[in-house]
Amino acid sequence: MIVKSDKEREGMRKASQVVKAALEQAEKFIKAGVTTLEIDAVVEQVIRSYGATPSSKGFHGYPNASCISVNDVVVHGIPSLMTVKDGDIVSVDITALLNGYQGDAARTFAVGNVSEADKKLIDAAKAAFFAGIEYAKAGNKVGDISAAVQLYTELNGFGVVRALTGHGIGHKMHEPPEVPNFGRHGTGSPLKSGMCICIEPMITAGDWRVKIDRDGWTTRTMDGKNAAHYENTVIITDGEPEILTL
């Protein structure tokens, strides 16, 4: 576990504000009729306008500035000429590198006339994040966050993806520790003041199992039901955590 200095935390605050701005612009742009590739272009333009670079572009060969996942795609959807339709739900996951520091966040957006079930799914992903962050403070353990996310999600009738987790973040996009969205209180890595982590519930309307498409990236629900994703970069403190991407 890497505890960040004051200087490093400030660098991460600035990088996280780039991500926040890109997500806000994506939300304004997304509507029926646009392609996921057009959404990605908007994200990249915002990131580069701040003098930052999109961390995902070229990461292990990933081709784009953001991950855009529609409906049953949980994460890592590759932007394409696919057109967003009325009633779709669209998850946008963005990581930006600014002056050697990373910021990372994701949101799921409703497009037009979305079903009540999908609205509840989107709201539950966000609420699960806030259930988990109640435990994101020095002296607790990662498992305390994980258990809270899982409990909230499953009590509300949704599935918790096991194959993908949150993570530490800093100079690298992914650092220790892993932050699962399921687990037991009192287990896992200890949380220390100054640590930076990404808490990111990925929840499903049905079964939690996922599969990866032949492209090696696109990760979708095994049963074809929709999924939602909500993520923020967070600094652990001795008191209330600092959410950098809100």
Image (spheres, grey):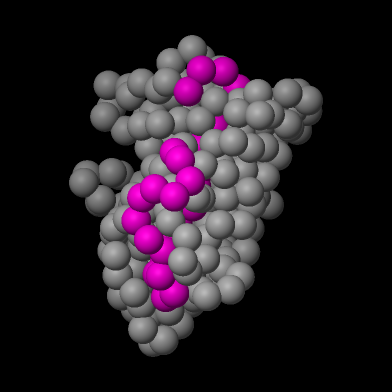
**Residue 159 visible in the shown view:** yes
Considering depth in this image, is 151 or 244 the residue closer to the camera? 151
Tell me where residue 111 appears, x and y as whole percent.
Answer: 70, 34
Question: Where residue 37 sits in the image (x, y, percent)?
Answer: 46, 41
Examine the rendered structure and indicate whether residue 140 appears above or below residue 205.
below
Can you say whether 82 is above or below 96 in the image? above
Q: Quadrant of residue 91?
A: top right
Q: Residue furthest bottom?
A: 7
Residue sitting at x 51%, y 74%: 237
Above or below 183: residue 236: below
Magenta stretch encompasses residue 201: yes
Q: Is residue 14 left or right of residue 171?
A: right
Q: Main secondary structure of the magenta part?
A: loop
Q: Residue at x 49, y 50 (%)?
A: 144
Queried whether the magenta region covers residue 204, the answer comes back as yes
What's the residue at 41%, 43% (across, down)? 180
Q: Magenta segment range?
A: 183-208
